[in-house]
Amino acid sequence: MALKSEWKRRLEMWRKELPRHFYRPLGSVEVEGFVTLDRLKPEQATKHAFTPMPVGTPWGAKWEYGWFRGQFELPREAAGKRIVLNLKVNGSEAMIWINGQIIEACRGPWEHALLTRSAKGGETYDLLTESYAWHGQTPCEAGPTPPGRVVIPEPPAAQHVIGETTFGVWEEEAWQLHMDVETLFYLRESMEQHSLRVAEIDKGLRDYTVIMDFEQPPEKYPEMIRASRARLGPLLACRNGSTMPEMFCFGQAHLDVAWLWPLEESHHKAARTLANTLALIEEYPDHLFLHSQPVLFAMVKEDYPDLYARVKKAVADGNILPEGALWVEADTNVTGGEAMIRQFMHGIRFVREEFGLESQVMWLPDVFGYSAALPQIIRGCGVKYFSTQKIFWNYHGGETFPYHNFLWQGIDGSEVIAHLHNDYNSPTRPDVMVDRWRLRVQPDGMSTRMVPFGWGDGGGGATREHLEYIRRTGDLEGCPKLRLAGPVPFFEDLVARGEHNINRYVGELYFQAHRGVLTSQARTKRGNRKSEVALREAEMWGATAGALAKFNWPAAKMDALWKTLLVHQFHDILPGSSIHRVYVEAEQALGDVIAGANAVAADAAAALTKKGDALTIFNSLAWPRKVLVTLPEAWNGATDSEGDALCVTIAQGRKLVETTVPACGWTTLTQAAGPRPHCTGGHARAHATANSLENDQLRVTFDPVGQVTSVFDKPAGREL
């Protein structure tokens, strides 16, 4: 007999009741603290003045961080128990130090931090935690906004209230029973309801609600929990046949370097995410975690050196996979080609120098469209594979992309092996895995899929739930086979199966949504392009001056300028989809890049310039350029690099000469020794007023807002 409505309601009640028995508090923690806008290291925070903050204390203005500390001792009854901390300072996210060491972070649905798997009883713990208050509402979208309506109100002076932080016993066996029940429930929900498999699962779930009698005294619970698990165990031991598809699964935490939070907060998010990952690896030694953006490693290296040392060991052990190829997950539409190559160069170099590994996958799950030039750049930078999932976001009703596996061919014919997965906030429940296969867009020519799992957007990563589901469903009858393996083994297996080149797609991978990002935040986009040009100028003249004039190249300064630009090409910064503060800071940062690069270019040009009474004009364009040059007041005329005298025109009191500067080169003018030749006609007769531009050929006039109102052809005597 299957789960009729009465039994299903009964099971639902048991599913709600069981989680109430996971945690048993043993005591509370009194905290004291302070708030700050500064990014502090723990050794700096502990020197600050802390004040008592009892339960009910309000705290947390916009952009503030709260630092809190407390001390507690485990009672003797904790001996042999798994003990956890339930932190309730109530910010958005928090990093937790116990006895001076980071243990993990508090974010999202998993709110219990592990203190010990088996307490001795009597231990004393010193708690220190940093929590971010957040910065008010952060909606991702808004409709029409009439005048006077405030879409995003300013947050109150105190966004949070201190709750009761407790420590207590975690009933692991009860939680494991919960995972057994949830696995079987979600599996039966995804299967054919009249199958024998569902009937057997339903019988087992009905029996569980009879065995587990929550109205009995609590001391009887352990025995009932063991009996329930014994009843459900055989249902979890059923294995698949030989033709079940296989999912390559690995943890990840898509972490936007800036989006609904500023770049500053990502320093904290990166550390919290990696702290959670390390804690999970201790519990599950087979856990694999893809961390795709080297800039996040660099942040942790700078701010949390002890944590970073643990991260490096996890990379060496093969648990953390620093794969992704780019410095940040960058926009590929507005970013220039040279900068795109620098994204690869800096990303690949960091992973090679820090971890001794070579990047093989371009990982871009959330970028808003993919240029047709990318396959050439990917292959030219030595990367083999490409993966995203964003192309499937056609929620405006566009046409669904037809493949998961394909050869992506670029403009020049370069090919890269591509796989499109789904979702970067993926659970691992059986019903989700069944749907991953059932709802694939490519019905033929594939037998495997890639499944990155874990909480993303703001980081966080996987939780114990993700890995416990995988433990139960690795080869569970009715669910696709799940295998813990990273993206590189997936692609290698794809090639071995011959399923990588069945389909081909040529040209741009066009993203059908988020179209407004190509035109929003114009000042940031302008700053990006001017930064790219300024850095090119600095490198061109710096390299030339180094070769010809022994110019001392400022490598460290240029490296920092490039990395600042690359960070601000992140796919929620450059396209224009972040909060206001991100753009205030981005415009300042890009302005600093332009100024810094211009200073280097000027120093290099000065090293190349002929000393004495001379004037040097540089041309960084790839073609010769005619320019008008204003001569110094003391000069009567000028001679170019070939020794030819240039004709001089007087215009608005200035002495002007026209000369041609070679492509990617320069020319030097010197003061003419003899009388100056005069020009007749030519572009030197240009004249400008507040609303017109004129020379001997054209007169162009403008209205007060800058629109062209007339173009008059003077030689022809007609209005154009």
Image (tube, helix red, strand yellow):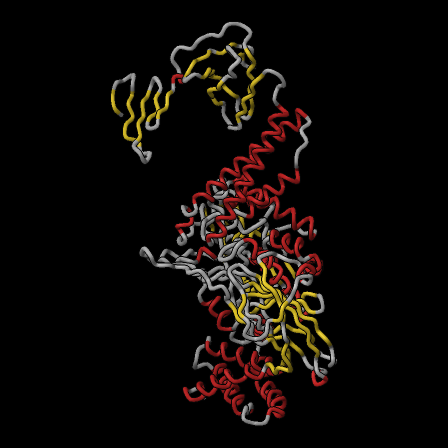
Using the image as rendered, state which of residue 699 and residue 298 is in the foreground. Answer: 699
Placement of 93 over or under 256, stated as above or below: below
Placement of 645 over or under 710, stated as above or below: above
Residue at 41% x, 16% y is 651
Q: Position of residue 160 (x, y in %)?
A: 52, 68
Q: Position of residue 15 (x, y in %)?
A: 51, 83
Q: Position of residue 543 (x, y in %)?
A: 63, 30
Give the farthest residue toward the left. 718
Residue 475 in sight from this viewpoint: no
Look at the image and tell me in which quarter the C terminus lies. Answer: top left
Using the image as rendered, state which of residue 43 and residue 241 is in the foreground. Answer: 43
Residue at 44% x, 86% y is 9
Using the image as rendered, state which of residue 42 and residue 648 is in the foreground. Answer: 42
Using the image as rendered, state which of residue 2 and residue 501 is in the foreground. Answer: 2
Position of 264 with respect to 120 (left or right) is left
Q: Position of residue 478 (x, y in %)?
A: 51, 75
Give the farthest residue toward the bottom. 216
